Amino acid sequence: MKKGDLSINIIIVAAIALIILVILSVLIFGTGGDIRKSTACEGIGGNCYGVDSCSENNDDVNTYIRHPTARCSIEGDICCVRQ
């Protein structure tokens, strides 16, 4: 093998590595754009309420519970999600 020659095996391995890199970057960077929005209450499908308990928002169809980690944009509000 000369100095400038590339074997077909090296080309195939490099192509597979490039495909894996593209897939990983799409999975990591294409999931949301703004990480703060995806971890916010609205980003996970919840609603922010300025009450002490999510059970005050329950109705005949939906039961709401407090989400332990999601944040609301207004301090003091709590994030309630459907159970």
Image (tube, rainbow, N blue to C red):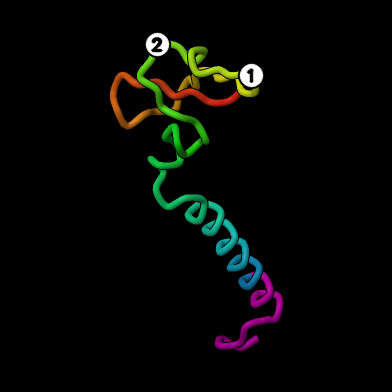
Q: Where is residue 54? Give x, y as percent.
A: 48, 16
Left or right: residue 52 compared with residue 28: left
Residue at 48%, 20% (x, y): give it: 68
Tell me the SS state at disc 2.
loop
Relative depth, front residue between 29 and 16: 29
Residue 52's disc number = 2
Residue 1, above or below 56 = below
Please, what is the three-letter code of the amino acid marked with disc 1? Asp
Query: In the rendered structure, which segment of residues is drawn in magenta?
Result: 1-13
Residue 82, above or below 36 = above
Q: Where is residue 50? Give x, y as percent.
A: 35, 19
Q: Are dots 1 and 2 in contact, CB under 8 Å?
A: no
Q: Where is residue 7? Give x, y as percent.
A: 67, 81
- What residue does disc 1 label? 60
Q: Is 56 included in the stretch rendered in magenta?
A: no
Q: Where is residue 13? Give x, y as percent.
A: 66, 70
> Along the polypeptide, which appears first: circle 1 or circle 2?
2
